């Protein structure tokens, strides 16, 4: 059973392009500053009303993030610069158990294991500020994989297969849910932010985003009870299991070839946000006729509260949903199945035949829903002196469904130096409130590049993850109009 679940999960990940080497976790340099413009809607749509730009067009922004607490690359063997060398081969070492080689080492503790990967591409997007309003159109491509609360014994079997001899002869019982979810989707959205209250130096803004979601692929496995026994490296006995699994992928399940529609499901998503800004000077009620005449109001500090990624995608094209209620089964001579466990059609039929007399009894629906990684966010940005700022944010995941992605919790604080031409910051992140990470980013005019995990580039520690992001935009700054010539006049 463990091998079946392993190949089901890993098979989905491989077919969807998962690489265990986002959007990025916070992409601090592209979202938190006063020059972030349309990108600020990634963390809170209400923050758009305080942009230094009256037009901000994103040409291309992307971020990639992966982190786990089980396997790591050794700092003694890993050099990021080596990957730039032609023909470089990463050093491998023999597994501690069984045959074969592996690039990573494993952490020897019995805590539950988590893996999170997140990839995002922000396509053509534009924001326009009109006095107290800000409007934005945005496009995104996103791919996320989350594996949560995996027991230590199962992590060992996934990594070493059944060759992990220290666990032979023991019966393991897990009553806490084990959750895996993967989702690939595109977004087409509109955002609106409005500064609804101004008094003296106080500014209050409200923002909302509505997104049409196109699901390319999705799947999840949820087990809330599992008891199994492995006497040796070739037999598995499942005493009891409760759970469900579902998937919808743009492939032929029997051949693994890409086929069918590019869109397997559709849905909607929403973001909500509110922000408070305390400005340096008093308020102004001037309504500017020309967008370029708008003035940016310097602030002493600003605070934001947001509810992000409320939404779902309904899959009904080549969708399979299975349910297991107090079932039991056995896998004997597991090694003989290796050559057949290479496609989802065979895996699904074989797994279900172990639990039911008729494998079709496990299939309960040809449609299912997956839910976005809803989170509650808080942002704070404080102006220490003229061009020096300190920003911080907290993100708390909100889980409410079995087939739901989960963004890790986290805390971030980042000092930065910010000017129109140049910006530099060093964010410190506490990933999932457990793993500390130090990052750095640099913006030159409208190009930003950075990472929230600098150790991956400087080889400071063992590497449990990797993170990088960059952004390129075309922007028009407020209070900067070209000279308007009189009619019929010629400029010499």
Image (tube, helix red, strand yellow):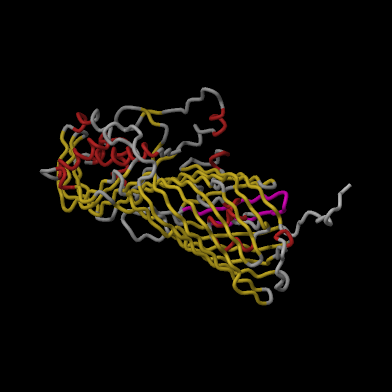
State whether residue 256 is above or below residue 311: above
Residues in magenta, as a range: 412-431
Q: Position of residue 452 (x, y in %)?
A: 55, 48
- Please indicate whether residue 477 sits to the left or right of residue 267 in the image: right
Q: In which quadrant of the rendered image does the N terminus lie?
A: top left
Q: Quadrant of residue 340?
A: top left
On whether residue 426 falls in the magenta region, the answer is yes
- Residue at 17%, 45% in the rendered image: 238
Task: Where is residue 298? Give x, y as percent.
Answer: 70, 64
The residue depicted at 23 percent of the width and 53 percent of the height is 225
Observer-nearest of 458 and 258: 258
Position of residue 287 measured from the top left corner of the image (x, y, whole percent): 70, 69
Reply above or below: 272 against 335.
Answer: below
User: Percent from the top left, x then y, of residue 73?
Assistant: 46, 37
Q: Main secondary structure of the magenta part?
A: strand
Q: How many marks?
A: 0
Magenta-span inclusion, residue 267: no
Residue pushed farthest left? 357
Residue ranking furthest to the top:
87
Q: Nearer the viewer, residue 321 or 111?
A: 321
């Amino acid at each position: 059973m463990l091998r079946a679940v392993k190949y089901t999960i890993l098979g989905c990940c491989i077919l969807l392009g998962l690489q265990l080497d986002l959007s990025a976790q916070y992409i601090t340099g592209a979202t938190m500053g006063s020059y972030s413009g349309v990108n600020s809607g990634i963390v809170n749509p209400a923050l758009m009303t305080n942009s230094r730009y009256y037009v901000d067009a994103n040409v291309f922004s992307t971020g990639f993030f992966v982190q786990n607490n089980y396997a790591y690359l050794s700092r003694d063997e890993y050099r990021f610069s080596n990957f730039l060398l032609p023909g470089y081969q990463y050093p491998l070492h023999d597994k501690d158990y069984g045959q074969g080689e592996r690039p990573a080492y494993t952490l020897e503790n019995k805590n539950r294991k988590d893996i999170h990967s997140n990839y995002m591409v922000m396509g053509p997007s534009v924001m326009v500020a009109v006095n107290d309003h800000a409007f934005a159109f945005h496009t995104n491509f996103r791919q996320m994989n989350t594996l949560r609360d995996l027991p230590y014994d199962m992590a060992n079997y996934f990594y070493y297969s059944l060759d992990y001899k220290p666990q032979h002869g023991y019966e393991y019982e897990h009553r806490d849910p084990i959750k895996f979810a993967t989702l690939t989707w595109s977004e087409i959205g509109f955002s609106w932010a409005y500064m609804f209250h101004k008094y003296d130096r106080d500014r209050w803004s409200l923002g909302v985003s509505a997104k049409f979601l196109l699901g390319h692929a999705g799947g999840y496995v949820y087990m809330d009870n599992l008891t199994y026994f492995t006497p040796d490296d070739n037999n598995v006995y499942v005493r009891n299991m409760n759970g469900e699994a579902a998937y919808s992928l743009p492939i032929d399940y029997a051949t693994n070839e890409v086929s069918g529609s590019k869109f397997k499901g559709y849905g909607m998503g929403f973001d909500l946000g509110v922000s408070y800004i305390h400005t340096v000077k008093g308020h102004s009620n001037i309504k500017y006729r020309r967008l370029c005449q708008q003035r940016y109001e310097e602030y002493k500090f600003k605070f934001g509260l947001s509810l992000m990624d409320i939404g779902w995608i309904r899959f009904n094209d080549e969708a399979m949903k299975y349910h297991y209620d107090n079932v039991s089964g056995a896998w004997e001579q597991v090694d003989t199945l290796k050559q057949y466990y290479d496609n989802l059609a065979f895996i699904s039929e074989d797994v279900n035949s172990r639990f039911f007399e008729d494998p079709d009894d496990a299939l309960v629906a040809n449609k299912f829903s997956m839910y976005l990684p809803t989170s509650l966010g808080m942002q704070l940005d404080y102006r220490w002196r003229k061009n020096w700022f300190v920003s911080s944010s907290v993100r708390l995941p909100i889980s409410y469904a079995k087939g739901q992605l989960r963004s890790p919790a986290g805390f971030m604080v980042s000092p930065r130096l910010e000017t129109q031409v140049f910006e530099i910051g060093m964010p410190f992140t506490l990933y999932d409130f457990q793993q500390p990470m130090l990052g750095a980013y640099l913006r030159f005019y409208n190009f930003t590049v950075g990472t929230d995990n600098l150790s991956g580039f400087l080889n400071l520690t063992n590497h449990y993850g990797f993170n990088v992001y960059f952004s390129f935009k075309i922007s028009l700054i407020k209070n900067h109009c070209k000279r308007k010539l009189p009619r019929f006049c010629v400029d010499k």
